[in-house]
Image (cartoon, rainbow, N blue to C red):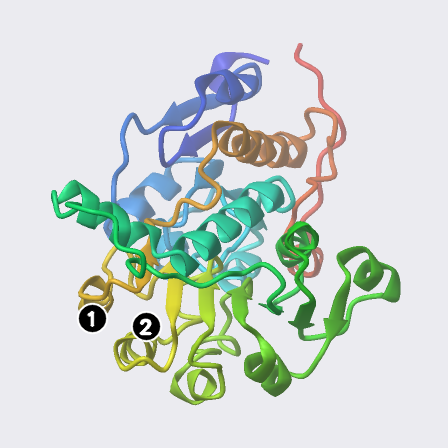
Amino acid sequence: MGTAAKPAVWISRPTFPEVIARLEPHFRVSAEPGEVKFAPAELAAKLAGCDAAIVGLKEHVGAAELAGAKRLRIVANLAVGYDNLDLAALGAAGIAASNTADVLNESVADYAWALLLGAARRMGAAERWLRAGQWQATEFKGWLGTDVRGRTLGILGMGRIGQAVARRAQGFGMPVLYHNRSRLPEAIERECRARYVDKATLLRESDCLVLVLPLTPETRHAIGAAELAQMKPTAVLVNVARGGIMDDAALAAALREGRLAAAGLDVFEGEPNVHPDLLALDNVLLSPHIASATTDTRRAMTAVAVDNVLAFFGHGPHAGHPPNLLNPEALAAAGVTFPPHQELT
């Protein structure tokens, strides 16, 4: 296959060159050298010039951005969540969409626990106090936090990440409650030592509540003022899912007024902007959407995106069967078929 005949792949952000190199025998590859926030028209122009795109959460791909993308066949998202992709618009255009499910479950679960422990023990505020030179002596009743050991852990959203969070609770001797759109099979409940309850019970009984929901129109503000009012004033809340699941203004008010003890947040509404009321509080631990940010996990996420692009065009171990398609039904309805395995000639 000559170079001129190769399809073009555009990658919207710097990733791992040794992983991206797997595309080069089959595609013309163009990768952005730095992090860029593309205006809609700029993104549309990028998509119009490629046959496949690997994008991140900053790239919101909808009908307007796809209007001129006549060659585009697949958009591979460098994330599990895909609220930045308009699946209806992609499907209507016969364009595949994929994500990076499964490879970041454990690292995100680890980070959820880091936020939970850090928020419960006031680690962020204590470090800022120390760095400011205010530690003059040790006070017996200074910096009192909350134990999590033996307390009740609640999980809202019990997919693979939620299950990984639950498994870690065993080491802390914590009973686990969960609420999900549908109840898990009994075998998974046993493995996670988790008990299904309704949402009201989850809110009422959880000492620590971790949010691991996808962001959809139905889950927007799943935790707002009414839900926070049902929680214990001693509870700690953690969100490692998506901004928008939590009403950040309502959370700030609950924390400020002592109706909730602490929170740890890795995601925010309107990020990278953070609600100013949260920035003013010492009982919330804030993190810049980095729960999956380990070298191994981000490399694995890149590899999954590459696998999906390769497979769509008939290359690699999954040739003809992209492993993480988000819209297979829409593609079938649009008559999209995958090429058979192709070898370089």
Mark 2, other Cα within 10 Å: few <14 / some 14–19 / many ≥20: many
Across and down, in percent, residue 187 comes to: 87, 60
Amino acid carrying mark 2 in the image: Asp
The residue positioned 48% from the left and 78% from the top of the image is 222
Q: Which mark is residue 248?
A: 2
Q: Eyeballing the image, is 299 above or below 337? A: above
- The quadrant of the image that shows the C terminus is top right
In the image, 10 versus 93, the foreground residue is 10
Q: Picture quarter containing residue 244? A: bottom left
Mark 1, other Cα within 10 Å: few <14 / some 14–19 / many ≥20: some
Amino acid carrying mark 1 in the image: Asp
As measured in the structure, the alpha-carbon distance from the residue carrying label 1 to the one carrying label 2 is 9 Å
> Which element type, helix, strand or loop, lies under badge 2?
helix
Relative placement, left or right, of 64 versus 222 is: left
The residue at which mark 1 appears reads as 277
Relative placement, left or right, of 286 versus 189 is: left
The residue positioned 32% from the left and 72% from the top of the image is 248
Across and down, in percent, residue 227 comes to: 47, 85
Q: Picture quarter containing residue 14? A: top left
Across and down, in percent, residue 190 comes to: 84, 61
The residue positioned 19% from the left and 47% from the top of the image is 137
- The quadrant of the image that shows the N terminus is top right
Outermost residue on the left side: it is 133
Across and down, in percent, residue 114 comes to: 47, 48
Q: Eyeballing the image, is 155 above or below 97? A: below
The residue positioned 50% from the left and 61% from the top of the image is 147
One can see residue 67 in this view? no
The answer to whether marks 1 and 2 mark residues whose Cβ atoms lie closer than 8 Å is: yes
